[in-house]
Amino acid sequence: MFELLIAILIAFIILLAVQIYALLRIRRFIGYLQKLLIEIGNRFGYFRVSTMNPSKTCQFCMYRQTYIKASLTGNHEDFIYRCKLKGKEISLNESCENFKMDPDL
């Protein structure tokens, strides 16, 4: 009876190892197919996948604050941007040494 339990335990461990190995191979295969699909799609122009990181400008910085500048004459509204660190008005294409990527983007 004890030998049967040991045999079942060994069989269970072997099957578990085989399943883990198979799952890792499947995962690697899916990653390969995904890269292949993106490359084929880019060659034929079906879709474009941007692999570039956003530029390090104030547009993507977590210290950027956005405000609406409402005018008293008419319904024309503009957005203005301020830096939390510098406390001054900025444009979206500016950059500085304190850049930190906004995690919400």
Image (cartoon, rainbow, N blue to C red):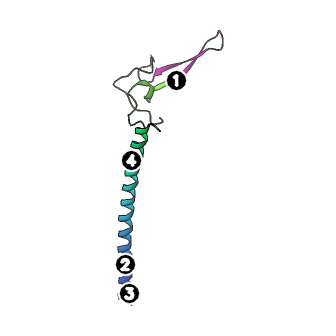
For this orientation, the residue located farthest to the top is: 73
Q: CA distance from mark 4 to mark 1?
A: 40 Å
**Disc 3/disc 1 C-alpha distance (Å):** 71 Å
Element carrying mark 3: helix
Q: Which residue is mark 1?
A: 66
Residue bearing mark 2: 11
The image quarter in which residue 100 lies? top left
Query: Sequence order check: which comes first, mark 2 or mark 4?
Result: 2
Any mark on residue 41, and which? none
> Of discs 3 and 2, which sits in the foreground?
2
Callout 2, which amino acid? Answer: Ala
Magenta residues span 67-83
Which residue is the site of mark 4? 36
Mark 3, Cα crowd under 10 Å, few <14 / some 14-19 / many 20+, is few
Is 90 located above or below residue 56 in the figure? above
Q: Which residue is the site of mark 3?
A: 4
